[in-house]
Image (cartoon, rainbow, N blue to C red):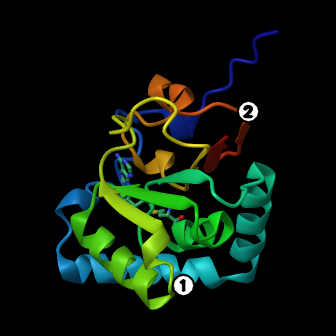
Amino acid sequence: MALGVAVPWDQGVSEYGQESMWRDTATADAERARDLAARLERRAKAEDEVAARDTYLGLLDIAAGERVLDVGCGSGAVTREIARRVGSRGLAVGLDPSPALLAVARELAHETGFGDRIEFREGNALRLPFPDRSFDAVVCVTVLSHVPRGRLPSLNWFESCGREDVSGSSTWTQT
Ligand SMILES: C[S@@+](CC[C@H](N)C(=O)[O-])C[C@H]1O[C@@H](n2cnc3c(N)ncnc32)[C@H](O)[C@@H]1O
């Protein structure tokens, strides 16, 4: 049965993510990057966020020695927790389009002692700069809703690695 209900929130939206402060971060200067990083680090410490992170990373069952990609890593809060889980023989790779945010992420990774097991790379979620099957798991936390035309992961995400996938409305993970 057709209900014929109008969906006001979807009317007039020509581009998803248009109003987001997290899009166009590639051009952020150092000052804006510090402000964005401070917001992310504050959020990462909140009790509910810690619990959620534990849950979605727990579902991935990350093992020592694995290689895990964090797409749209921002200041690297999730990347650092991944680095803790992969251990000294593993590798966490944080990808973000913002060189200035990545600079802050590198600083924080070194300060917390995880610098040697994290690589931060500049890049775009929609064109991952890695060959297929480069990773054991991929996470993308609160990113796609800020990416124009980013509602669906591009096909090469699914080809990037091997196991099953666990998705949520704003957090997307794949092993
Ligand atoms: C809300 S922040 C989330 C950061 C991190 N995932 C976290 O949860 O702490 C959104 C991030 O997506 C990044 N981003 C925006 N557009 C992107 C794109 N096209 N590809 C990858 N990352 C993007 C931003 O630079 C920003 O770091």
Residue shown at the point (56%, 28%) measured from the top left: 158
Q: Amino acid at mark 2?
A: Glu
Task: Left or right? Give the position of 32 relative to 12.
Answer: left
Mark 2 / mark 1, whichever is N-terminal: 1
Q: Amino acid at mark 1?
A: Arg
Which residue is labeled 2 in the image?
164
Residue shown at the point (41%, 40%) measured from the top left: 16
> Quadrant location of residue 128?
top left
> Quadrant location of residue 58?
bottom right
Residue 169 badge: none
Which residue is labeled 1 in the image?
42
Q: Measured from the top left, where is residue 85 in percent x and y?
A: 68, 67
Between 1 and 109, the one nearer to me in the picture:
109
Q: Is residue 121 above or below residue 17?
A: below
Residue shown at the point (54%, 42%) measured from the top left: 135
Q: Measured from the top left, where is residue 105 in percent x and y?
A: 38, 75
- Quarter occupied by the N terminus: top right
Between 146 and 95, the one nearer to me in the picture:
95
Task: Left or right? Give the position of 95 relative to 11.
Answer: left
